């Protein structure tokens, strides 16, 4: 593993000629303006923006001082060491400068290793952004003994890009410690501005073929298989309700817990000594959060190696108020540890990786182990919201359990397949003269005269559909302090119907969507940034794979 003290990360400031020229040189093009005129316009517009604003003000976590870090992320428990040595790169800004969400733009190199069968070097870089990008572009430059190899890739209109690369030009290198890695990650946002950062001497994970690890075993009490696409569904802050489709539930919702115990079995004559560093990332595909201050006393020894439990209190706060609801979460853990071979030689270091990323399936290495994806459950309506049940009576949403029957907006019976619960500091207060007040989270969908609309997009121009089929004008719609539990339901039909059936329920007399409709609407509301065909063609040509 590279020494983190040598890590260099910087954001390119195109108002500086040296940064601008360095970016152009990546593409080794004699006449960039002539060959790629549309992409050149993006670069020139970004350069002008940087000049007019006195440079580029983006800072990565690694560029921040401890004071900068605490000022920007004051609600996160990080000490000076973890702030300055974090292995997470922030390459942009969230939607609000004062947003205290744990999710930030993150770019990190997952691993680099030599495949023993093909003798090729293989690596992976992941970029996750809070906002969808028109394009995400990677340039990875590998250097060794005067030989240089460049690998490039790009993807459009997405918030996460996992780039896997390989090359075979370094057969003479004994191991990946001989390789210098330079990475440039750039993205184009909805305003057609480009942000570019470069990293050199990256502190990457070296999955060494000569690892002392014989096997990594992940113990999951429910024996849930780690097939791609499989979720481990976890509820926090409550017990499992009767008939609810949960894998695990934790009554305590204040700290992060996962239902896994990991055992690392070392080969014969090797002995575990201590933990040197731990990087724990939780990726929601629209941003990344890093958990720090993980202490080594969580790691225990046994005769054949060491182990740790993810379901213990690691002292890492889980911000349920902003964690995405019912969203696939990817866990990445890179762990550097010290061991000895019992030969009297000085102790050595090795790295292992635990991840739920599908792309890591290509890694045939005992120092890597895949685990399932995670999904956390929260909710979306005020706890006292009254839902019309199948018998016509009303019941508080907080008292409803899975497998109960409700009536939808068309008077049809629907089965409650899942109850979701969460917590919100603020909530949207919505009122009409006909039905009074309903409290809903910002994302919860309401049926209106213009179709389904999320609560935070409602205006007095919208009319809400009532249970009797009439529409009512909105008299009030504003955010208010709440600081309490919220709930949502996932519904299904009693008999099989088309999957695109709109799932609704009657809440306080209003026809609203369920959790499925909320997720559909959230995807629909995402900013879809389309590149002009001629610009897309140029970017594709520039960043086509060169392996």
Image (cartoon, rainbow, N blue to C red):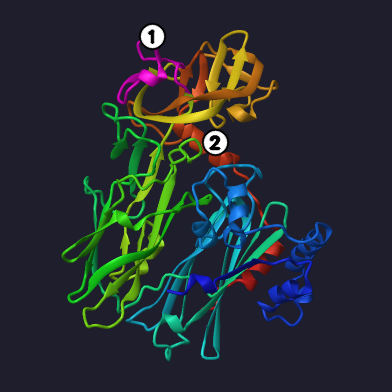
- How crowded pointer 1 is (Cα within 10 Å; few <14, some 14-19, many 20+) is rated as few
Q: Residue at x 43, y 53 (%)?
A: 293
Q: Which residues are magenta?
A: 382-405
Q: Residue 39 versus residue 422: which sits nearer the camera?
A: 422
With 91 as the anchor, is 319 left or right in this view? Answer: left
Which numbered disc flags the more N-terminal residue, 1 or 2? 1
Q: Position of residue 126 (x, y in %)?
A: 50, 62
The image quarter in which residue 120 lies: bottom left
Given residues 301 and 280, the one toward you in this image is: 301
Left or right: residue 119 compared with residue 520: left
Residue 340 point in image, percent of width and height: 26, 76
* Distance between mark 1 and mark 2 Cα atoms: 29 Å
Residues at discs 1 and 2 in contact (Cβ within 8 Å)? no
Residue at image mark 1: 393
Determine the secondary structure under disc 1: loop
In the image, 36 versus 258, the foreground residue is 258
- For the residue pair 321 and 62, the one nearer the viewer reads as 62
Q: Identify the residue shown where x is 71% and y is 80%.
A: 29
- Label 2 sits on a secondary structure element that is helix
Residue 323 left/right relative to 130: left
Residue 406: x and y, percent?
38, 18
Does residue 161 show up? no
Instruction: Please state the total of marks drawn on the protein image.
Output: 2
Instruction: In the rendered structure, find residue 146 and report the number of the disc placed on it.
Output: none
In the image, residue 389 lies in the stretch drawn in magenta: yes
Image quadrant in which you'd find residue 101: top right
Count residues near mark 2 (Cα–Cα under 10 Å), then give few for <14, some for 14-19, many for 20+: some
- The residue pinned by badge 2 equals 521
What is the x, y in percent for residue 459?
68, 24
């Amino acid at each position: 593993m590279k020494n983190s003290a040598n890590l260099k990360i910087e954001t390119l400031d195109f108002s500086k000629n040296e940064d601008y020229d360095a970016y152009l040189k990546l593409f080794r093009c004699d006449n960039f303006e002539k060959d790629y005129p549309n992409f050149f316009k993006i670069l020139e517009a970004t350069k002008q923006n940087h000049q007019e604003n006195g440079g580029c003000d983006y800072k990565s976590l690694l560029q921040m001082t401890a004071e900068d870090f605490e000022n920007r992320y004051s609600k996160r428990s990080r000490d000076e060491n973890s702030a300055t040595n974090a292995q997470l790169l922030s390459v942009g800004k969230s939607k609000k400068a004062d947003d205290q969400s744990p999710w930030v733009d993150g770019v990190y190199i997952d691993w680099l290793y030599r495949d023993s069968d093909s003798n090729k070097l293989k690596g992976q870089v992941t970029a996750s952004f809070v906002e969808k990008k028109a394009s995400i572009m990677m340039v990875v430059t590998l250097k060794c003994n005067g030989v240089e190899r460049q690998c490039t890739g790009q993807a459009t209109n997405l918030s996460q890009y996992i780039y896997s690369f390989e090359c075979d030009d370094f057969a003479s290198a004994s191991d990946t410690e001989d390789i210098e890695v330079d990475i440039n990650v750039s993205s184009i946002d909805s305003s057609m501005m480009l942000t570019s950062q470069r990293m050199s001497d990256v502190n990457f994970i070296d999955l060494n073929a000569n690892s002392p690890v014989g096997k990594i075993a992940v113990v999951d009490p429910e024996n849930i298989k780690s097939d791609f696409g499989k979720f481990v569904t976890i509820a926090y802050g409550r017990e499992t309700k009767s008939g609810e489709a949960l894998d695990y539930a934790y009554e305590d919702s204040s700290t992060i817990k996962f239902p896994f115990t990991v055992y690392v079995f070392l080969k014969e004559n090797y002995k575990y000594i201590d933990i040197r560093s731990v990087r724990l990332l939780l990726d929601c595909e629209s941003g990344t959060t890093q958990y720090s201050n993980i202490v080594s006393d969580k790691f225990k020894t046994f005769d054949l190696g060491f182990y740790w439990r993810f379901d213990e209190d690691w002292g890492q706060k889980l911000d349920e108020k902003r964690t995405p609801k019912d969203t696939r979460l990817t866990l990445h853990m890179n762990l550097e540890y010290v061991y000895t071979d019992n030969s009297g030689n000085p102790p050595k270091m090795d790295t292992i990786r635990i991840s739920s990323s599908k792309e890591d399936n290509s890694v045939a290495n005992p120092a890597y182990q895949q685990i399932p994806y995670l999904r956390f459950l929260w909710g979306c309506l005020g706890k006292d919201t009254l839902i019309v049940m199948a018998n016509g009576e009303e019941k508080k949403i907080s008292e409803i359990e899975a497998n109960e029957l409700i009536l939808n907006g068309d008077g049809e019976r629907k089965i409650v397949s899942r109850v979701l619960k969460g917590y919100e500091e603020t909530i949207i207060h919505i009122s009409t003269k006909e039905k009074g007040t309903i409290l809903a989270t910002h994302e919860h969908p309401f049926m209106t005269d213009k179709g389904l609309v999320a609560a935070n997009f409602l205006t007095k121009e919208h009319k809400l559909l009532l249970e009797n089929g009439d529409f009512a004008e909105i008299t009030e719609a504003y955010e208010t302090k709440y600081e309490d539990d919220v709930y949502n339901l996932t519904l299904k039909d009693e008999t099989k119907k088309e999957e695109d059936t709109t799932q609704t329920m009657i809440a306080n007399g209003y026809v609203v969507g369920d959790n499925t409709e909320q997720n559909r609407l959230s995807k629909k509301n995402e900013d879809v940034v389309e590149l002009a065909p001629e610009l897309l063609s140029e970017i594709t040509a520039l960043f086509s794979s060169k392996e």
